[in-house]
Every structure is written in C-alpha cells, then in structure tokens.
Image (cartoon, rainbow, N blue to C red):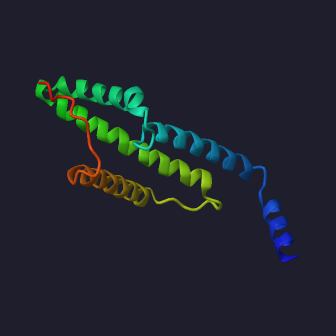
Amino acid sequence: MNEIKKSDQELLSQTPDNLPKTLLQKLRGGFFLVIGYLLSPLCWWNDLVFNLPIAYFFGSICSLLAPKLFMPCVIIGYWLSNIIGILLMQAGAIDVFQKHPQERNLKKELFTGLVSSSVYTFFILLLIQFKIIDTPNFWSGI
C-alpha cells in the first residue's frame, strides 16, 4: 500500500514542466547513444563508413601544416573518433537509463570515459602483443 502511495506522489510531482525535460533528455541521450555506438569500436562495420573517413579528414587537415603529419594524424584521428564514440555512448546511456536526474559532474564523466577507453585500447594491444588475437598483415607483399 505504501508503494502505491509513493508512486502516486511521484506521478503527481511530475509536473508538465518536468515531463518534457525528461523526454527531451531521453531523446538526446538516445541520439548520443546511437551516434556513440556508430563511432565506437563496439560496432564492427563502422570503420569503413565513419571512422576512417573522419581519420583521413583529420590527417588531411594536419598535413596542411606539415606533410609528414598525415599518417600520424590519421592514426590519432582514428583513435580519437573511437574515444569520442565511447564517451558519447556513456553520456547517452546516463541520460537514457538514469532513473532520477542528478547533478552531473562533467570532469568526472570525462575522466571515467577516457580511463575506460584507454584501458580498452591497452587491453586490445595486450591481446595483439601476446598473439591471442591476430591482426592481418596488409603490407606483407611490399
């Protein structure tokens, strides 16, 4: 019985002013979640469609400063697009799945996202280094 009263009070406390804000937050969170998934390494087909063109564009912009920067900046751009994807997924998931709106700490969320993304990258590099997973050698004939 107490649960019914509590839920009635929660419904009454949601005024029309709070309701659209929550709906807009969930829509924004869903948008961030989808875009983040498309940029993240969790999506297996995204590289050809999203990440590599973004990385190529980033490398092209950097090569205007110095032509030798093209390839390092392509690699950095690729890594950044994956990191941004993970951060967008995290921000979107917080907006969509968090039940009660809380004050957000952007520095803490950014730090957590960067740490988790870096740990993921380091873990994949360890798997490659210890030959648990194999990478194709595209330049074997060169």
Q: Residue furthest bottom?
A: 2
Q: Residue at x 23, y 50 (%)?
A: 131
Q: Residue at x 84, y 77 (%)?
A: 2
Which x, y percent locates residue 112?
39, 59
Camera-side residue of 130 and 47: 130
Between 91 and 51, the residue placed more toward the observer is 51
Image quarter hosting the N terminus: bottom right
Q: Residue 127, percent across and down?
A: 27, 53
The correct choice, above or below, for 100 with respect to 64 in the image is below
Assign the C terminus to one quadrant of the image.
top left
On the image, the x and y values in percent for residue 68 come to 11, 28
From the viewer's perspective, is residue 112 above or below residue 73? below
Q: Quadrant of residue 102?
A: bottom right
- Could you say where residue 21 lies in the image, as x and y percent from the top left? 67, 48
Q: In the figure, is residue 90 to the left or right of 20?
A: left
Query: Could you say which is closer to the camera, residue 120 or residue 94?
Result: 120
- Residue extending farthest to the right is 1
| 7 in relation to 68, above or below | below
The part of the image, by quadrant, that contains residue 71 is top left
- Residue shown at the point (78%, 64%) measured from the top left: 10
From the viewer's perspective, tell me whether residue 68 is left or right of residue 38.
left
How many numbered discs sit on the rendered protein? 0
Name the residue rendered at 41%, 26% in the picture. 49
Residue 126: image quadrant is: bottom left
